[in-house]
Image (tube, helix red, strand yellow):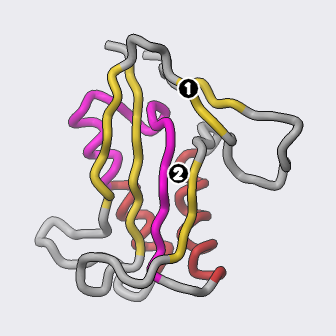
Amino acid sequence: MPSAVTLIRSSALSSAAEYAYAATAPADSRLIFLAGSCPLNDDGSTAGVGDYAAQAARCIETMTIALHAASAELTDVISTRVLVASSRQADLVAAWEVVRDAFGEHDVPSTLMGVTVLGYDDQLVEIEAVAAVVD
C-alpha cells in the first residue's frame, strides 16, 4: 500500500539536514500517535546498556512492532522526536545515525534532542513518532 505521507523539502532551507523539513497527510488519513519507543527487551530489562546505537536500534524495532499492530510501517511515519540522555553531541549523533539509516529514503521531519534522564534504568534513547495511513 502506498504511503499517505508526503515529505516536503524547500530549496530555501539548508540542505545540510538529513531529513525533510515538513510532511503532510491527506484529510482522510488516520493518524497514529505512538508512545515513546523504549529500548526494552521482552523481559522488561533495558537492552544495550551503555550503547546509544544499540538502544536506538531496539527503539526502532519496538516502534516497528507498534506500527504493525496499527496496520502501518516506517514509511507511514510523518514525524519523529529522538530523545537521547546525554549532553554530548557525539552520543546524539550515534543514536541519530541508526534512526536515519532505519528510515532510509523516507527521511521524515525529525527533532533530535539531548535530555537529562529517561524513564527506565540505564535508558539512553527513546523515540516518539506520529504516523498517517489511509484505510
Q: Which residue is pictured at 44% across the width and 66% down the height?
A: 56
Q: In this rendering, which labeled residue sits more in front, label 1 or label 2?
A: 1
x%, y% of residue 93? 63, 72
Q: Which residue is mark 2?
A: 102
Q: Which residue is mark 1?
A: 24
Q: Is residue 76 magenta?
A: yes
Q: Residues within 10 Å of mark 2 (few under 14, many from 20)?
A: some
Count of picture labels: 2
The amino acid type found where label 2 is placed reads Ala
Query: At numbered mark 1, what does the secondary structure look like: helix, strand or loop?
Result: strand
Considering the image in quadrants, where does the N terminus appear?
Answer: top left
x%, y% of residue 43? 11, 71
Say if 7 sits above or below 56 in the image: above
Q: Which residue is pictured at 27% across the width and 28% down the height?
A: 71
Query: At numbered mark 2, what does the secondary structure look like: helix, strand or loop?
Result: helix
Considering the image in quadrants, where does the C terminus appear?
Answer: top left
Q: Which of 4/2 is in front?
A: 4
User: Which residues are the magenta region?
Assistant: 62-85
CA distance separating discs 1 and 2: 20 Å
Q: Is residue 89 toward the left or the right of residue 40 in the image?
A: right
Q: Which residue is pictured at 75% across the width and 34% down the height?
A: 9
The amino acid type found where label 1 is placed reads Thr
Instruction: Name which quarter of the figure residue 7 lies in.
Output: top right
Q: Which residue is pictured at 85% across the width and 49% down the height?
A: 14
Q: Is residue 83 magenta?
A: yes
